[in-house]
Amino acid sequence: MKDFFQDKKQNFAHLPPGYRKAKHELPERGQSKSDRIKKYIKITTIGLTFFGTFCLLFLHPFFQVTSISLQGLNKIKESELRDTINGILSYKKFYLLPQNNFFLMDIDEMHSILTQKYAVQNLLIEKQFPHTLNISLQEKLSTIIYDNGEQYSLVDANGKISEILRIVDDNEWRVIRKTVSSTNESGVQVNTDMIVSRVHTPNYKNLTKEIGEYPLVYDTRQRTVSKGEQVLDETSVKQVIEWYELLKKINVPISYFQMEQPVGEITIKIDEGWYIKAKLNDKILEQFQVFEFLLKEKIERSQIEYIDVRFPGRAFWVGGE
């Protein structure tokens, strides 16, 4: 019993003077009302700043594209191209973010859309701060001028007449005459002026001034044609354009292409007074390389009469030696 009622000793340790409980050991006190208000004001201020910056950069009219500069247009209609660009710019991502904003505008997407819709060879799109869009392009050549001796027409990439341009002028025909002598019933000599032949020379310089630079094909078969009619096959159009672009690269001034029988052979008239005889086939580059070599290494250009590259592995020429 004595042991039961005996006071038990309590274990304790003396704490050193100045000891303070760690902060995490102190009991938490509830935030005061003023602390909560300060925290709310801070969060609200940050939110409003972010929202204001967002609206200023992405929604303010100052950063909307309002000026579009276009350069290099030839066959593409400016009004049509502007409508397409404005349609792209009017789109809103997520029904909120405008594509006409200087910072949000997707140049790569616009480039993709325009190259798919229009026949362009080169396209450069640049943004100019704060609201200008500069577009420079080079149209892909897909149209030629077709001359049947009666009228000039535009032919599209498929070889069909897309537009009748104008009638061939009389002064584009050279008439070769010959005086023939004969004796009538009375024994009197009679001289008669007869037309021996008519030679057509297309006025490519005037056509260039009127509608721009395109390959001009004179079809000596002189077919009667109308709008929408197929006058050349798609491959021939492509190959004429290929010859045209290759010769322009080395500064050979082309007058026009003369298409003759048999179909597939062509004479390329050069503005310097000579011509090239070639074929429209899948070996145009090989023919051109032979021509270019002759022009650089073998022939005096000012003395050429003609160069014939129709036959693989061989070439013929007159003049220039």
Image: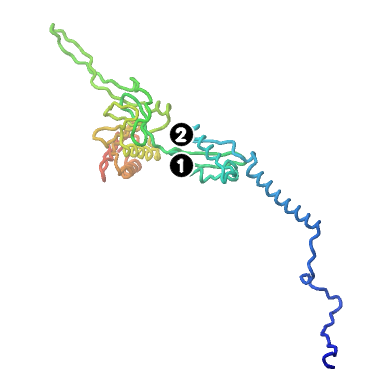
Residue under the point 51% across and 45% down: 109
Residue under the point 83% across and 73% down: 20
Residue 14 falls in image quadrant? bottom right
Left-right relation of 185 to 318: left
Percent across and percent down for residue 97 are 59, 44
Left-right relation of 269 to 139: left
In the depicted structure, whether residue 2 falls above or below residue 97: below
On the rendered image, what quadrant is the N terminus found in?
A: bottom right
Which secondary structure, mark 1?
Answer: helix
Q: Which of disc 1 and disc 2 is earlier in sequence?
A: 2
Percent across and percent down for residue 314 are 26, 44
**Residue type, numbered disc 2:** Ile
Whether residue 215 is visible to the viewer of this picture, yes or no, is no
In this view of the protein, which residue sits in the foreground, 250 or 94? Answer: 94
On the rendered image, what quadrant is the C terminus found in?
A: top left
In this view of the protein, which residue sits in the foreground, 209 or 80? Answer: 80
Report the coloring of the rendering.
Answer: rainbow
Q: Are marks 2 and 1 in contact (CB under 8 Å)?
A: no
- Residue lying farthest to the right in this orientation: 17
- Mark 2 Cα within 10 Å, few/some/many (few <14, many 20+)? few
Left-right relation of 245 to 315: right
In the depicted structure, whether residue 53 falls above or below residue 1: above
Report how far apart the C-alphas of labels 2 and 1 lie in the structure. Answer: 12 Å
Percent across and percent down for residue 15 are 84, 80
The residue carrying mark 2 is 76
The residue carrying mark 1 is 115
In this view of the protein, which residue sits in the foreground, 79 or 6? Answer: 6
Count of numbered marks: 2
Residue 253 falls in image quadrant? top left
- Residue lying farthest to the bottom in this orientation: 2
Percent across and percent down for residue 274 are 32, 33
